[in-house]
Image (cartoon, helix red, strand yellow):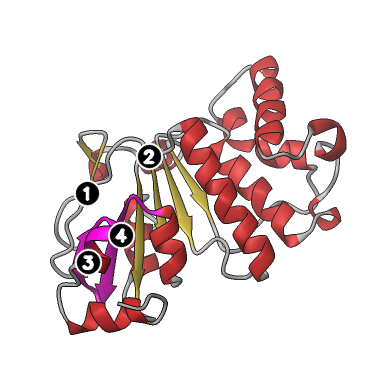
């Protein structure tokens, strides 16, 4: 990555898009130290992330993957409560949080709490993946192409779910996707990468109205007629 600089404000979603191999997921994974940087600084809540113990950092940042990677031998309830347990929450607070999140994801505890991942559809698994990422009330949530493996109808439903969660929770997030329409729908601001370089950043409207160069114009024209 070269000359990439951005800020994510509280309650904001930054969408990151770019060509294949542009460094979208690489950039995302540097934010929670899954990958190390060789130069430059990343700050989280005013502190350099290298000054925060890595486990402590990751427990403050939710992470939603393309594949939810739920533990198959654990119930849905147990999958969601993992991080709060690691943080030492009381059993009562954990149980309350699990029920709250399942209601929030429109998957009531009485219907889903004791099920296993194998009993869920792809969209339901991803909803549980999101609930697990939100379980400990993180200050930042990272989404790494979470809907790319889903069918168009399920994907559209979950996009609306993210918009609803943003409004309800005032969630701060970084959302990586290869889908231009998804990036513009979900992002308050959008960052466009190409070959490891930041080409343009701005609101969806700013980018559509004023693409910085021919690359950006052609890239977004695949979805939008400019």
Name the disc covering residue 209, or none: 3
Q: Is residue 220 above or below residue 39?
A: below
Q: Taking the image as drawn, is residue 197 in sight? A: yes
Q: CA distance from mark 3 to mark 4?
A: 9 Å
Alpha carbons under labels 3 and 1: distance apart: 30 Å
**C-beta proximity under 8 Å, tags 1 and 4:** no
Q: Which residue is mark 4?
A: 204
Q: Name the residue rendered at 24%, 77% in the picture.
A: 216
Q: Are marks 3 and 2 in contact (CB under 8 Å)?
A: no
For marks 3 and 4, the one nearer the N-term is 4
The residue depicted at 47 percent of the width and 40 percent of the height is: 166
The answer to which of marks 3 and 1 sits earlier in the sequence is 1
Callout 1 crowding tier (Cα within 10 Å): few <14, some 14–19, many ≥20: some
Of the pair 222 and 96, the residue shown nearer to us: 222
Q: CA distance from mark 1 to mark 4?
A: 24 Å
Per the image, is 88 magenta?
no
CB under 8 Å between callouts 3 and 4?
A: no
Specify whether residue 192 is painted magenta: yes
Q: Which residue is mark 1?
A: 42
Judge depth for marks 3 and 4 and give the one in front.
3
- Which part of the image, by quadrant, shows the N terminus? bottom left
Q: Residue furthest front?
A: 226
- Residue sitting at x 34%, y 42%: 12
Magenta: predominant secondary structure element? strand
């Amino acid at each position: 990555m070269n000359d990439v600089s951005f800020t994510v404000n509280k309650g904001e979603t930054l969408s990151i898009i770019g060509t294949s191999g542009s460094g979208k997921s690489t950039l995302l994974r540097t934010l929670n130290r899954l990958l190390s940087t060789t130069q430059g600084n990343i700050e989280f809540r005013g502190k350099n992330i290298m000054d925060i113990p890595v486990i402590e950092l990751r427990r403050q940042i939710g992470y939603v993957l393309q594949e939810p990677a739920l533990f198959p031998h654990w119930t849905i309830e147990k999958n969601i409560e993992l991080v709060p347990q690691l943080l030492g929450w009381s059993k009562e607070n954990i149980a309350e949080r699990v029920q709250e999140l399942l209601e929030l994801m429109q998957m009531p505890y009485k219907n889903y709490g004791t099920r296993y991942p194998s009993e869920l559809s792809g969209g339901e698994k991803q909803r549980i993946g999101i609930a697990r990422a939100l379980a400990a009330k993180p200050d930042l949530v990272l989404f790494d192409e979470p809907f790319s493996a889903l069918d168009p109808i399920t994907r559209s439903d979950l996009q609306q779910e993210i918009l609803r969660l943003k409004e309800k929770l005032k969630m701060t997030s970084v959302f990586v996707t290869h889908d231009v329409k998804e990036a513009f729908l979900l992002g308050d601001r959008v960052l466009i990468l190409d070959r490891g370089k930041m080409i343009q950043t701005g609101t969806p409207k700013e980018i559509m109205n004023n693409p910085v160069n021919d690359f950006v114009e052609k890239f977004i024209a695949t979805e939008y007629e400019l």
